[in-house]
Amino acid sequence: MSCGNCPCSSPPPPPRPTADGGGHPVGAARRDGGTDRNPRSRSACRLPQSARWPHRTTDSRAGQSTVGRPEPPHPPANRLHTVRIFEGSLTVGDPVHAAVDPEWRIGARQAHSGTHVVHAALRQVLGPNALQSGSYNRPGYLRLDFAWRGGLGDTTRSEIEEVANLAIRRDLPVEVRHLPLAQARAEGALALFGETYDDTVRVVEIGGEWSRELCGGTHVAHSAQIGSLALTGESSVGAGQRRIEAVTGIEAFRYLARERDLVTQLAAQLKARPEELPDRITTLLARLKQTEREADSLRGRLIDLDADTYAANAVDLDGVAYAGITTTGDARRLAEKVRDRLGRRPGVVGVVRGASIVVAVTPAGVQRGLAANDLIKRLLAGKGGGSAASAQGRADADPVELLDRLRDLARAA
Ligand SMILES: [Zn+2]
């Protein structure tokens, strides 16, 4: 369904099964069955009324529709249908049968009225500058973009959610009126900035002036029919634009039930009551950090021990001390510790871990022309880099072969 005087068209019904097993959307349907109220997005609503054809007028008493042009005056405008024909043909005067899926319709109404409720709650909590710039809803889900700078924060989000649910609980009446545009504006009805409207517009009110918007969408009769509303997200969608997302009706219940199940599962895993979870997790994280620090310290001490051994076992290659090592630990740390233990001697250390190699050279080694970055480049055909004292790179070569080549380079100095 679409509307000539409203930015918020009501969602089209979902695909219905057909003889070929597939479903075909009716009307100007999006693939996901939702509607988009962003004024920049494409919508059947943007077409001038004269360009919309065929129009279908519905006799709700008989459940029959007739293809033809609507009689002026135009409102109620939501009797216009854009149809796609997948089989056969449709001509002016053909009787057609229109049917609404009641379950789908309930979800669509809840989500659409929920959008208005969230908008009003946003404005109640944040003030009149929080003005909607676009929205989208489908049964069970809604999102709303609005002008605002910066994130809302947990407390503000909770407040908006509570205001929305209190409005639902108060069972506010939902009223639809057709008014001259000027009167609607004078009464403070909210419209999308930059949107053009007909002279006569449809105004939807929830709780009177609490929520008063120009709208062509389908709505619940009173706010309690929305059932429940849960905010599920809030994010930035551009400079000065935020997006708030929510679920309504049975989807809100399902969302909250999933959250509860998650908390129950975590509480069982951590052997804590749900309200103890934040403290328990904080304690566990602190303990984990402490354990990581201790493990790191122990690893350092093990490397020290290893480095002593490797330095003591370094071979002498015509005056250059050389140690070639393979490890599964921290290659760089080990290479540099062994190098430091070689002291004032010219020395070259190579440590291979997997496909990477670290070369470390003592100051006397560098003076003798054995810069680590130079050795790495010669070993790895120009790949890798670092300083004269320590360099690294990746190679596909066999570690033993790589260290043999490094040993040859060290010996040749
Ligand atoms: Zn609306």
Image (cartoon, rainbow, N blue to C red):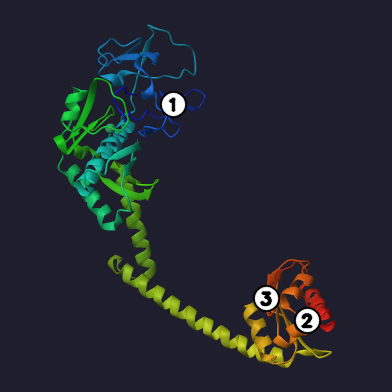
Mark yes or no: residue 176 visible: no
Between residue 409 and residue 254, name the one nearer to us.
Answer: 409
Give, as a three-letter code, the residue at label 3.
Ser
Cβ–Cβ under 8 Å for marks 2 and 3: no
Circle 2 SS class: loop
User: Which of the two marks, 2 or 1, is nearer to us in this view?
Assistant: 2
- Ligand 1 appears in which quadrant? top left
Instruction: Pinpoint residue 93: horizontal percent, then vertical percent.
Output: 37, 6
Disc 1 secondary structure class: loop
Q: Quadrant of the C terminus?
A: bottom right
Give the residue type at disc 1: Pro
Which of the image's four quarters has the N terminus?
top left
Q: Residues within 10 Å of mark 3 (few under 14, many from 20)?
A: some
Q: Camera-side residue: 97 or 149?
A: 149
Residue to which mark 3 is pinned: 387
Which residue is drawn at the image coordinates 82% and 76% (left, top)? 405
Residue 372 in picture, x, y percent from top left: 72, 77
Mark earlier in primary sequence (2, 3): 2
**Amino acid type for the residue under numbered disc 2:** Gly
Q: Residue at x 74, y 68 (%)?
A: 395
Query: Label 2 neighbourhood size at 10 Å, few (<14), some (14-19), many (20+)?
Result: some
Dot label at residue 190: none
Q: How far is the residue under mark 2 from the one under mark 1?
A: 77 Å
Instruction: State the SS at label 3.
Output: loop
